[in-house]
Amino acid sequence: MNYEIRSTFNIDAPKSVTIKGRTPGHPAVPQQDLQYIFRQSTLSDLFTWYLLGERSLYLTGPTGCGKSSVIIEVAARLNIPLWNVVAHSRLETPELIGGYRLNAGGGMDFVHGPLIIAMKEGGWFLIDEIDLLDPSTAAGLNGIAEGRPITIPETGEVVTAHPDFRFIATANSNGAGDATGLYQGILRQNLAFLDRFYMIEVGYPDQDIEKKILTEVAPSVGSDIRDRMVAIANEIRALFVKGETEVTLSTRTLTRWARITAFQGRAAASQGMSNGETLTKAFDRALGFRAEPDTRTALHAVLQRHFGDRRSP
């Protein structure tokens, strides 16, 4: 089934341009976020990977920039089944492939894991934070990343990947480790494993896109306030990159801040709270309480410089 790119993704494209998807109805297709705004450059990269028929994809970029969400939203609109797992240092291949489980009769049945199900169903398998995975475990996925059959040791079953199966990974690093020291637990991955991926670098959306996002998620917050929120986000990100803060204001956190501000705005006004107090209270619940006390004080100073004591949002 083909989908018109322009109407499906709400981007500027000729009406004649379409992309292949699946027929609706599979239970593993994620639900769409109707307020999601696609970035044309990232979408173009994704479509190139998809149309080339590459088996595996690796998206790298800073925390909260939208690496996983763009995969989820593309799968939702093309009706592609998606199985999603979050990696960690203790994750082992059998957890992805499957294992024996006790059945109702007291016996043991082998139950396929999410990776094998995705291979059989021809869906997308998304593993988030793959650079937290032990490199030896990741290396065990080399054949799968290339689309080769896998033999399940416990049963001897040989699983051949469906032609539409795709293996997708996201990470804060490009697999070479974290030279910045900004992300804890990141491990340098095996070069042979990384060599199997089509790589896409994802950054934070530009200011115009983030302003659009805030308009969608918090329309009751004034445009001047939203513009200042975006400016603050970029300033805090710059401090984070320079190592001057241990927290950053991702797009995910930015939208949370705007939502909380919108929710609290009317109540705050009725209680006589100033706009600056309302914004700071919402900011702390979105990000500030994750920061060390000295950092929080510095972040509050950034807010004060941008907002001062303005009227209620």
Image (spheres, grey):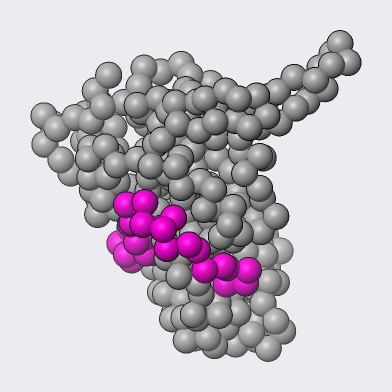
Q: Quadrant of residue 85?
A: top right
Say whether residue 305 is left or right of residue 109.
left
At horizontal 51% and vertical 74% (from top left) the residue drawn is 178
In-front residue for pair 79/281: 79
**Could you tell me residue 231's position as x and y percent?**
40, 74
At horizontal 36% and vertical 17% (from top left) the residue drawn is 23
**Could you tell me residue 192's position as x and y percent?**
41, 58
**Could you tell me residue 230's position as x and y percent?**
42, 68
Q: Quadrant of residue 181?
A: bottom right
Please indicate, yes or no, whether residue 86 appears anywhere in the rendered image: yes
In-front residue for pair 266/150: 150
Tally of numbered discs: 0
**Could you tell me residue 309's position as x and y percent?**
55, 80
In-front residue for pair 233/40: 40
The verdict on residue 206 being magenta is yes
Is 283 rendered above or below residue 114?
Answer: below
Say whether residue 116 is left or right of residue 73.
right
**Magenta segment boundaries in residue numbering:** 183-211
At horizontal 70% and vertical 72% (from top left) the residue drawn is 289
The verdict on residue 63 being magenta is no
Is 291 rendered above or below residue 99?
Answer: below
Is 41 rendered above or below residue 148?
Answer: below
In-front residue for pair 103/81: 103
Is 295 rendered above or below residue 147?
Answer: below
Please indicate, yes or no, whether residue 228 appears anywhere in the rendered image: no
Q: Residue furthest top?
A: 105
Image quarter (top left, top right, bottom left or bottom right) of the N terminus: top left
At horizontal 54% and vertical 88% (from top left) the residue drawn is 244
